[in-house]
Image (cartoon, rainbow, N blue to C red):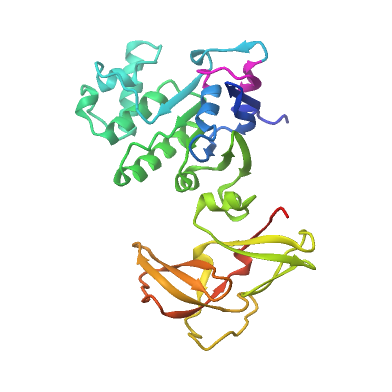
Amino acid sequence: MPATPPRLETTDLSRSFSGRPVVENVSLSVAPGQVTCLLGPSGCGKSTTLRLIAGVDHADRGEVRIEGRLVAGPGLHLPPEARGVGLMFQDFALFPHLTVAENVGFGLRIDRTEKARRVDALLERVTLSGFGPKHPHQLSGGEQQRVALARALAPRPKVMLMDEPFSGLDNRLRDGIRDTTLELLKEEGTAVLLVTHEPDEAMRMADEIALMRGGRIVQHGAPYNVYNAPIDKAAAAFFSDINVIRGVSRGALTETPFGAFLTPGHPDGGPVEIVIRPQHLKIDFDRGGRGPNPTPQEGTPARGTVLRSRYLGRESLVDFQMDFEGARLTASVPGVFLPSPGTVLWLMIRRDRCFVFGLPR
């Protein structure tokens, strides 16, 4: 039985402005009902990639297929209205002179009765029943966002392209509207490509994350894998704060104040960086200051002096000046933990949670 083609597929999509590459060889595919997040810092090419797929900009080279149909390629560029994609942007782009119902039904080319039925069903689905006669200026930001979602879903697009659609909402509304949006898109079986610069949003919504940097996709996979197996230090640092311990690999081992780390695959005598997130830097409360006592998983404790601590609600962050090489490390502790500056504590690191990356000599 032949495999079902992806709803959306790009191959070697590239675009330059004034000779400067902005998107380079972007290849990805999105299946029906799948949410893929293009994640990366501002200026990395995410929005340009979305514009190329939507057809509002021309690629210099590469191909775009929707449901297996070529819509952009050598000598071919179908306009946005001929591609059958839905678009959602952060500015909502509602027509101020039209009612909510007229906005939702704007792109529908069906008879009046069926249109009214579809509009009512969508407004009910986004919990805006009875809002049809209102105008956009009478709505809150969250309500406008839901109207924009209903309008984008009205024609039942096979592919939905979303460019930072939730960034204009305050934190109180954002999570609920994101969840509603995701639920609706999954129900419709829509293939979704979502652009965001927020790792938390990508982790919350995506089935797959395509991490972009400098116009290229540098890592692509399930959120768990991208987070827990970053391709390099920059990828690890994009998702969270990191601590870095530098050393030299000798005989596939790197000695650190926390004990020896396995560093296979790195050249003998080559510099390496051992990266660990603050939540995996553990404070040895049991030993206090009684000194090192190696454990199989967590290795040798190292001594540090508290520089400062602050409470962030769910966790506390504690900065340490370590005894070795003037290093500074930060630990994340669940709940309230606010030791005074100058307090001496012993720290351990989860070696199974560390990442080792080589450095050029």
Q: Is residue 80 visible?
A: yes
Quick one: 72 or 6, which is closer to the camera? 72
Quarter of the N terminus within the rendering:
top right
Quarter of the C terminus within the rendering:
bottom right
Relative placement, left or right, of 128 versus 339 is left
Q: Is residue 71 magenta?
A: yes
Relative placement, left or right, of 29 versus 267 is left
Residue located 37% across and 29% down the image? 149
As displayed, is residue 193 above or below residue 106?
A: below
Residue located 36% across and 66% down the image? 310
Quick one: 84 or 269, which is closer to the camera? 269
Relative placement, left or right, of 273 versus 329 is right
Magenta region: 54-73
Quarter of the image for residue 2 reads top right
Q: Is residue 190 visible?
A: no
Quarter of the image for residue 356 reads bottom right
As displayed, is residue 8 above or below residue 98?
A: below
As displayed, is residue 331 above or below residue 134?
A: below
Residue sitting farthest toward the bottom: 290
Report the number of numbered marks: 0
As displayed, is residue 140 above or below residue 224?
A: above
Q: Position of residue 285 (x, y in %)?
A: 47, 81
Q: Is residue 142 magenta?
A: no
Q: Position of residue 282 (x, y in %)?
A: 51, 72
Quick one: 360 or 39, which is closer to the camera? 360
Q: Position of residue 115 (x, y in %)?
A: 35, 16
Quick one: 181 or 262, which is closer to the camera? 262
Relative placement, left or right, of 26 versus 119 is right
Q: Position of residue 93 (x, y in %)?
A: 34, 23
